[in-house]
Amino acid sequence: MTWMAVESKMFSAVAYEAPGKMLYLRFRRGDVYRYFDFPASAYETFLAAESKGRFFLSEIRDCFRYERLARLQTV
């Protein structure tokens, strides 16, 4: 899995595992969450979204099963 930095006020990086359909989001405050059963097409739409935060709030949060993985130190 490879993390990709994103331009967003909400997220610092994202990653996607196609075989397991899992989306990983690293929030600016350091929290890392994994979202299950996330379609590859939705990941592409998320990456292309003008506002990833707005897309998250309307299309991801409360729509997919998730778990919190860690809180990373931010520099």
Image: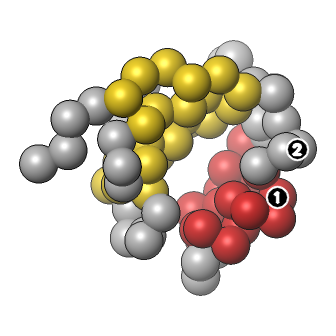
Q: Which of 72 and 49 lies nearest the eye of the viewer?
A: 72
In the displayed structure image, the side of residue 32 where residue 75 appears, left or right: left
Q: Would residue 9 appear left or right of 5 to someone viewing this image?
A: right
Q: Residue at x 36, y 49 (%)?
A: 29
Residue at 77 percent across and 49 percent down: it is 61
- Residue reaching furthest left? 75
x, y percentage for residue 74?
20, 44
| Displayed quadrant of residue 18 | top right
Task: Tell me which amino acid carries mark 1.
Answer: Glu
Query: What residue does disc 2 label?
Result: 63
Residue 31 vertical position relative to residue 6 in the rendered view, above or below: above
Measure how far apart labels 1 and 2 are at the Cα level: 7 Å
Label 1 sits on residue: 59
Mark 2 Cα-neighbour bin, 10 Å: few <14, some 14–19, many ≥20: few
Tell me: residue 56, above or below residue 49. above
Q: Position of residue 31 (x, y in %)?
A: 43, 37
* 35 on left or right of 71: right
* Residue 54 versus residue 25 in the image, above or below: below
Q: Is residue 15 visible?
A: no
Q: Secondary structure at mark 1?
A: helix
Of residues 55 and 71, the one drawn nearer to the viewer in this rendering: 71
> Residue 58: x percent and y percent?
82, 65
Q: Quadrant of residue 47?
A: bottom right
Q: In this rendered view, identify the residue nearer to me: 73 or 47.
A: 73
Q: Using the image as rendered, state which of residue 12 and residue 29 is in the foreground.
A: 29
